[in-house]
Amino acid sequence: MRVLLVEDDGDMAETLKASLSADDHTVDLAGDGELGQSMALNGGYDVIVLDRMLPKKLGVSVVRELRDQGVSTPVLILSALHDEDHRVEGLNAGANDYLGKPFSTRELLARVRALWNGRNREPQTKLAVGDLEMDLLARTVRRNGKKLDLQPREFRLLEYLMRNSGQTVTRKMLLENVWDYHFDPQTNVIDVHISRLRSKIDRDFPQSLLHTVRGSGYRLEG
Amino acid sequence: MRPRLDALLRSTTFRLAIVQAGLVLAFVVGLLLYIYLETAGQLIRDSDVLADQEYASLERAYAEGGIRRLNQEVVERAARPGPMLYVLAESNGAVITGDFQQLPALPGESAQRVDFSFDRADDNGAPKHDRARGREGRLLGGPILVVARDLGDTAVIAGRITRALWTVAVFGLALSLVSGLLAAWQASRRAEALANTAREVMAGDLSRRAPVSGLGDEFDELAEAMNAMLARIEQLVQTTRTAGDAIAHDLRSPLTRFRQKLEAALERAANAEADREALRNAVEEADRLHEMFSAIMRLARVEASANWKLERVDATPILRELVEFYEPAAEEQGLTLHGEVGDHLVVRGDQGLFTQAVSNLIENALKYTQTGGRVELRAQRRADGRIEIDVLDDGPGISPGDRDRALDRFVRLEGARSTPGAGLGLSLVAAVARLHRGGLHLRDGLGDGERRGLSAALVLPALEQAP
């Protein structure tokens, strides 16, 4: 997909560009907020990755103005300021995701893919990955026709994985999107939740759907 | 330091003293005017009446007995002792008889009030310049009559009163200027003491405090407020300094390790697998450094902020969810995590920080409790209306003597060295508790005997009473 990267730090921009390119994206680079905004207006990008502190125009202003100008391209803000206030401000301005620096490259790549995946998500009532089916209205999950018994939080966790099926989701993404926690637990709490979910959806079936991606996170794939 | 005179003259107190002196002056002038009107003014009015009566009486004598009778009356009356003066003149102004030799002015058609000076001999025969006031008029047929009263004595009295009042005014003015200067000097001396303290603090001595006189006046109030501010600043600076030292200390070793590992990997013969392992380690080390740094920054931000935006936070679902969140991990560790959360626990706070503080307490308990142990979260409204969120474990606990120190930032007690963590957990919780106008209390937990266990209780004021 086509990614617009707006970042003024030259080294950082080159590293990010190389990583995104290696992940099969076509990357255009803008070095300041104004240039980034005009490129975003004309370029037809799939995802915009925007630094918060930019020369000429701040990232938050760029997003707000792009949204006012009718550009709905998903935006990910990168910021060294990642207090709750700043995050909320960025999201309120119209950004779709907010990632604090420093971050791992895998985290960034996973989030860019998730943004692309969710760009024009239509309201769905049913999700399916392989023979796993989720009915969002009836709040039921079946695998191969057999009903699975999930706790409410497990249901939310599985829903998020299914919506992002085929892609890697990081622990941080799960924390933020499933629990709305914006701190890093020091223990392996997420891993335990995943293994419990896995025991419910995969144990009695020959084919595993929920995979661990070493060093990154998890992937649900049929 | 002695305040300089020009600084004194510019001071607010002195300006007030000047205004006060002006008021004294205005009052004295007003008093002067009043006394003058009441004394000299009254004398003048009385003499006007007297002169008018005499004039009317002489006018009658003229009407009855003509110029001869008038002349006679004037001569008689002028000869009498007393303050009244009489002059009779021909219609052209030539004086016929009377107390002095020249008319004050030629009168018009009707009688008029005259106020004039004249020379005459006093009682001892010496020449005397005097003031007189009376009535002058042209009688039927042309002669001019002047009846006046000598104001000499009156003027003397009025003069004395005026002089006395001026003397009082000058003394009053001098007195208010001197007292103003004294007050200004006193005020500047104390303001100067405050300014000196400020200058000394600016020069780097944060331990300086403004002198408090003990009089309990506004300067004391100012000095006390300033001292409280300085104490707070000193505490914050001390915290920052400690944090700086601790950052230097705590980050130096992981940074050194980081560098050594990379260096060792560089010096070794190329080995793809070992190199990758070294890089992975380096990334983990960098993450740890970052995590620690974030924790330090977060703590500094919570501690430094007095005006954090606090909102209504319903603690009950947050606490239940946290227990649910950590329960599987506890079980995996061979521990039991049990939650007992009361309904409708509402506090005023920051949801993110509150959640993080409680999660720190739970993680802390999980970290120090051995396999087979138990951790409990009990949240309830206490009898005093405050909300207590108590996380208890049956781990080694903290001895009473170490508890205060455990809440200091960066302190990691002996025996905790081998367990991971930046040592910021409890101090962050304590800082969050302070931000929420509450406190963190450490006590013995679920253990007994050798293993005392730890109870870390977050006590916060309740926002709403139970329904």
Image (cartoon, rainbow, N blue to C red):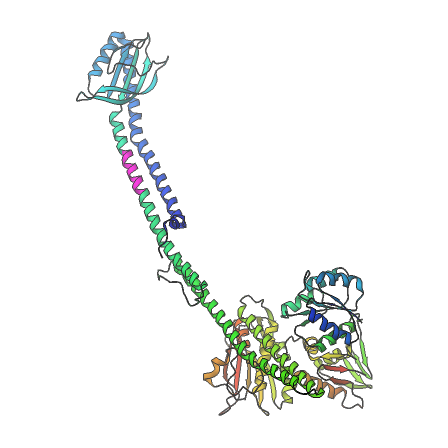
Give the residue displayed 72% in from the left and 80% down from the top.
A157
* Residue A42 % position (x, y): 80, 62
Horizontal relation, residue B246 to residue B162: left or right: right
Magenta residue check for B164? yes
Horizontal relation, residue B174 to residue B335: left or right: left
Q: Mainly helix, strand or loop, the magenta region?
A: helix
Q: Which of the image's four quarters has the N terminus of chain B? A: bottom left
Q: Would residue A168 be seen by someone viewing this image from the given angle?
A: yes
Asked whether B166 or A154 is in front, the reply is B166
Q: Quadrant of residue B127?
A: top left
Asked whether B220 or B330 is in front, the reply is B220
Q: Would residue B458 be seen by someone viewing this image from the given angle?
A: no
Report the number of discs: 0
Give the residue displayed 30% in from the left and 26% down from the top.
B44
Query: Which stretch did the figure color magenta?
Result: B161-172
Q: Quadrant of residue A59?
A: bottom right
Magenta residue check for B187? no
* Residue B378 % position (x, y): 57, 82
For residue B3, above or below residue A106: above
Q: In the current view of this chain or complex, which residue is farthest to the left?
A: B124
Q: Which of the image's four quarters has the C terminus of chain B? A: bottom right
* Residue B42 % position (x, y): 30, 28
Asked whether A9 or A101 is in front, the reply is A9
* Residue B159 % position (x, y): 27, 31
